[in-house]
Amino acid sequence: MTPFIRHSGVAAAFIRENIDTDLIIPKQFLTTILRSGLGRHLFHDLRYREDGSEDPDFVLNREPGRGASILLGGANFGCGSSREHAPWALLDFGFRAILAPSFADIFRTNAFKNGLLPAVVDPAVLGALAASSEPITVDLEALTLAQGGAVHPFTCEPWGRSALLEGLDEIETTLRRLPAIEAFEARRKRECAWL
């Protein structure tokens, strides 16, 4: 997994409460287990009209949203189902960080596991960030968001922060402890051979 230490980019503001995983990536696109190719279906029902053309009113279909790598969302972002396709689609579109007042638990966990930062931001700060078109710098080491001359704090779970800073997924984290695991297994075989 690519480490996330600091990222600068433009933001798309889609600040709406309870953005659920079915809205992020509708069920008809869950037929793949590949993590690539889902970005074109991100927010499908909002991005495209019935005839398949883009809806120019949706934030990701106009500048600066079209090239955004930071998404500003509302409270309880990622609620609904446990589909891991939601962070896959956000990452495939090009997002590296989602800034919102709160996240659904499973979405937040899936985001960390896939290298997408779910940063918890005060609603007033979110509004200030959305009011400017200046790029935002997300500094995960310092837990700050910088835009223009302003710097704001954000929070994220310590284990997720550590995993993103080191670029480690769960398997890589487990493999780092391989000597301790092997030592435990060897001791268990000696002391509990009947198991």
Image (cartoon, helix red, strand yellow):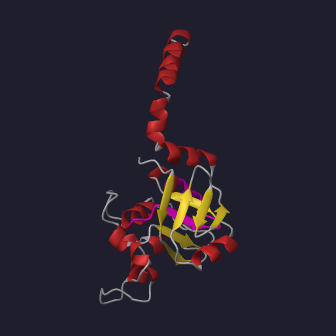
Residue 112 at x, y = what percent? 51, 52
The image shows a total of numbered marks equal to 0
- Residue 104 in view of the camera: no
Outermost residue to the top:
190
Left or right of 69: which side holds 50?
left
Residue 44 vertical position relative to residue 175 in the rendered view, above or below: below
Residue 22 vertical position relative to residue 167 in the rendered view, above or below: below
- Residue displayed at 54% across by 53% down: 109
- Residue displayed at 49% across by 37% down: 173
Residue 47 at x, y = what percent? 40, 82
- Residue displayed at 49% across by 19% down: 185
Left or right of 85: which side holds 71?
right
Residue 107 at x, y = what percent? 53, 60
Residue 115 at x, y = what percent? 46, 53
Q: Name the foreground residue: 20 vs 67.
A: 67
Q: Name the foreground residue: 180 vs 128.
A: 128
Residue 75 on the magenta span: no
Quadrant of the image occupied by residue 118: bottom right
- Residue displayed at 62% across by 58% down: 144
- Residue 30 in view of the camera: yes
Q: Which residues are magenta?
A: 94-110
Residue 5 vertical position relative to residue 23 in the rendered view, above or below: above
Residue 82 vertical position relative to residue 178 in the rendered view, above or below: below
Residue 99 on the magenta span: yes
